[in-house]
Amino acid sequence: MMRLDDNDDDVSLFDAEEDTGRGKSKKTKIKHPLASFFHLFFRISAILVYLLCELLSSSFIACMVTIILFLSADFWTVKNITGRLMVGLRWWNQVDDDGKSHWVFESRKGNSKQLVSDSESRIFWLGLVLCPVIWVFFVFSTLFSFKIKWLAVVIMGVVLQGANLYGYVRCKVGSRTNLKNMATNYFGRQFLKQAMTKQEES
């Protein structure tokens, strides 16, 4: 188990043991079609209900409740099921005995990493990144069109889908210190490359 961004240890996710026998199948094959379907179904349904709400129903409350139910189902499904099955990542928050909150990030390591299908990984990350961007667009369109009653709904979409995006990016990339180190190393290499180029020219 990885706790507080510790990325060094191997971790066994719920389905890692049962999937080891199927690890030799093609990496491009979708191994979890049901998980892949529901990964996209709830989030696309929430967006479609938001876009078609005025055509489907005259009741704002019914539309709002339907969208929030889809968003909540999507949050739970992506956080607890599809991330673990499709890309071998999982995150959650737990409170210890002292009342302190700890973020826990898990990822498959070593040989079990090969169990992740490229197709499923693309579906997962595309859905995870694209939908929060759409909800951010909805926030601005709601503000600019003065449909203030929808503001709480679109902010809920940004928060729920943005939380999953943040959690899985932290699982994939690592802690903030790792992000800082990556940025520092990148800019250091760029600076060194430019210095070497200038030295060669002169």
Image: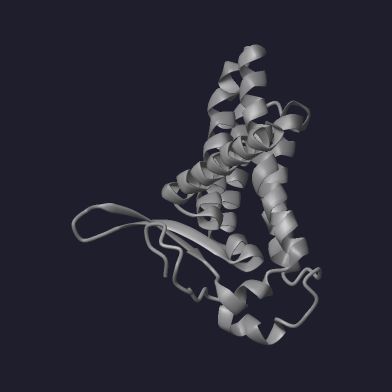
Residue 68: image location, x then y, percent: 57, 40
In this view, the residue farthest toward the front is 202
Residue 186 screen position, x and y as percent: 57, 43
Considering only vertical position in the picture, is 1 above or below 173?
below
| Residue 65 visible in the shown view | no
Q: How is the image coloured?
A: one colour
Residue 170 against residue 130 in the figure, above or below: below
Q: Residue at 20% across / 61% down in the picture? A: 97
Q: Count of labels shown?
A: 0
Q: Quadrant of the C terminus?
A: top right
Side (left or right) of 184 relative to 133: left
Residue 53 higher or lower than 116, as above or below: above
The quarter of the picture where the N terminus appears is bottom left
User: At 63% across and 68% down in the image, what residue appears?
Assistant: 85
In the picture, measured across the screen, residue 95 lies left or right of residue 136, that is left
Instruction: Where is residue 164? Give x, y as percent.
Output: 54, 48
Give the side of residue 173 with respect to residue 4, left or right: right
Furthest toward the bottom, the residue is 21
Residue at x-position 52% and y-position 37%: 159
Q: Does residue 38 show up?
A: yes
Relative to 106, is 75 above or below? above
Which x, y percent locates residue 79? 54, 56
